[in-house]
């Protein structure tokens, strides 16, 4: 017999081995391409190009929100047309569908004009679809992570800028011993204090914007701006006029945002020792006079709740040793390990038990005691203290 038949069989076998080897190389390339890229468009296109080689197709299309395709334009057009008709009976067209982590389905479709898709081809196409789904999931998770990181960085920068609105200095005012400190529960807080000395008189504001985080911090900067403007424009008219000015400035923006701010505005004149206060819902506020420590109640609801048309104010003459202590509810509502709150009574007793302390000493003591009380419990809210001690002018440092 002639050796032609065996030679032909050897050639066919050699060709099949070459084709199988090519497919194995394509499969290897397909499995390795996702390791060095997290860009969805790039990695999907590379997978489709390798899959086209592996499946020996004329066109491949991946249907997602942004479709991806590879192949000759005419083949892509034919496949796109076939996608809108019934695949049944079209053995030259195959498809496989996978579900993303988001629940969205993606479908990869293939066109091979010269030969039909067999069982092995369909299994390979399923593997390609699974790989494409994994690549898309990974790329989108990476995109979300990058977006969140950028947002977190922007949030942190904005928070730091907002917190920088709080003054970092204490005025050296003869006849007044001062302390001011705020510790936000997050990187940004809604507690505020600010002050200005105008013609020898201390004008101050202490408040707490509802909510936490960046929205409260941004609103806090607005309230500080309004308070400082009120100091300079209305200080000669008294604390009630200043409160009225602040309310006119921020009421609408607070109301529109569904927010409010508890706000105490006041003035202390060391020369006359007159203390004026106008309080819109802020608590706790303690005034110690002649050795008697008493809470001072608010004159009005918080700013942003109702317009303050006719604000009230109190006026008292302080003696040497008298003092004003203003805190935020982050002090009194701090939870301890046992689930109880620090409370107004504990704050009152600590102030009352230390009448000779300077403002700085008392402020440090109160912050330390709140921290000790909290134990391992997290800080629940911003903590702020503002203290004014009336002292003889010669003893003020």
Image (tube, rainbow, N blue to C red):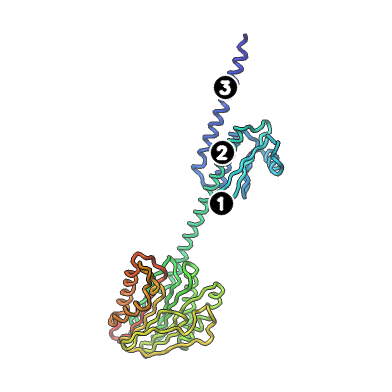
Residue at point 61%, 33% (across, down): 121
Secondary structure at numbered mark 2: helix
* Residue 308 against residue 60 in the figure, above or below: below
The residue that disc 1 covers is 102
Mark 2: give few (<14), some (14-19) or many (20+) Cα within 10 Å.
some
Give the Cα distance between marks 2 and 1. Answer: 20 Å
Which quadrant, please, contains the C terminus? bottom left
Report which quarter residue 132 is drawn in.
Answer: top right
Single out the residue that lies furthest toward the top: 1
Can residue 27 be seen at all in this image of the molecule?
yes
Q: Which residue is mark 2?
A: 127
In the image, 248: left or right of 292?
right
Q: Secondary structure at mark 1?
A: loop
Q: Which mark is residue 253?
A: none
Circles 2 and 1: CB distance less than 8 Å?
no
N-terminal of the two: label 2 or label 1? 1
Spot occupied by residue 318 in the image (x, y as percentages of width and height): 35, 89
Which of the pair 233/42 is nearer the observer? 42
Which quarter of the rendering shows the N terminus? top right
Q: Is residue 20 left or right of residue 81?
A: left
Residue occupied by mark 3? 14
Spot occupied by residue 208 in the image (x, y as percentages of width and height): 45, 75
Q: Are marks 1 and 3 in contact (CB under 8 Å)?
A: no
Please state which of residues 88 and 135 is positioned toward the viewer in this rendering: 88
109 and 349: which is toward the camera? 349
Residue 300 position in % (x across, y down): 48, 83
In primary-sequence order, the first of circles 1 and 3 is: 3
Q: Spatial distance from mark 3 to mark 2, Cα to Cα?
A: 27 Å
| Neighbours of disc 3 within 10 Å: few (<14), some (14-19), many (20+) | few
The answer to which image quadrant residue 251 occupies is: bottom right
Which of marks 2 and 3 precedes in the sequence?
3
């Amino acid at each position: 017999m002639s050796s032609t038949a065996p030679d032909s069989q050897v050639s066919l076998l050699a060709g099949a081995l070459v084709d199988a080897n090519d497919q194995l190389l394509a499969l290897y390339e397909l499995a390795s391409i996702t390791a060095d890229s997290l860009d969805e468009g790039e990695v999907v296109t590379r997978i489709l190009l390798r899959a086209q080689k592996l499946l020996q197709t004329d066109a491949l299309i991946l249907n997602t929100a942004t479709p991806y395709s590879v192949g000759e334009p005419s083949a892509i057009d034919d496949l796109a047309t076939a996608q809108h008709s019934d695949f049944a009976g079209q053995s030259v067209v195959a498809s496989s569908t996978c579900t993303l982590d988001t629940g969205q389905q993606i479908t990869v479709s293939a066109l091979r004009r010269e030969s039909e898709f067999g069982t092995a081809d369909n299994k390979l196409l399923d593997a390609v679809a699974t790989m494409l789904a994994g690549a898309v999931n990974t790329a989108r998770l990476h995109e979300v992570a990058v977006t969140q990181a950028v947002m977190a960085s922007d949030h942190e920068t904005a928070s730091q800028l907002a917190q920088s609105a709080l003054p970092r200095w204490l005025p050296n005012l003869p006849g007044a011993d001062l302390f001011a400190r705020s510790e936000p529960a997050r990187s940004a807080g809604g507690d505020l204090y600010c002050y200005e000395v105008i013609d020898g008189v201390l004008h101050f504001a202490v408040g707490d914007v509802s909510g936490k985080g960046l929205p409260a911090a941004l609103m806090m900067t607005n309230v500080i701006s309004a308070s400082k403007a009120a100091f300079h424009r209305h200080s000669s008219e008294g604390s009630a006029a200043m409160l009225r000015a602040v309310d006119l400035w921020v009421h609408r923006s607070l109301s529109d945002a569904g927010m409010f701010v508890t706000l105490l505005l006041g003035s202390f004149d060391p020369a006359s020792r007159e203390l004026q206060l106008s309080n819109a819902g802020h608590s706790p506020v303690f005034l110690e006079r002649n050795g008697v420590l008493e809470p001072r109640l608010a004159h009005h609801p918080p700013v942003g709740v109702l317009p303050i048309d006719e604000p009230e104010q109190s006026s008292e003459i302080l003696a040497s040793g008298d003092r004003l202590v203003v805190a935020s509810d982050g002090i009194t509502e701090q939870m301890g390990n046992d689930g109880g709150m620090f409370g107004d009574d504990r704050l009152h007793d600590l102030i009352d038990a230390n009448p000779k302390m300077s403002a700085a000493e008392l402020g440090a003591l109160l912050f330390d005691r709140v921290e000790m009380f909290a134990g391992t419990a997290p800080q629940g809210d911003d903590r702020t203290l503002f203290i004014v001690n009336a002292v003889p002018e010669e003893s003020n440092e």
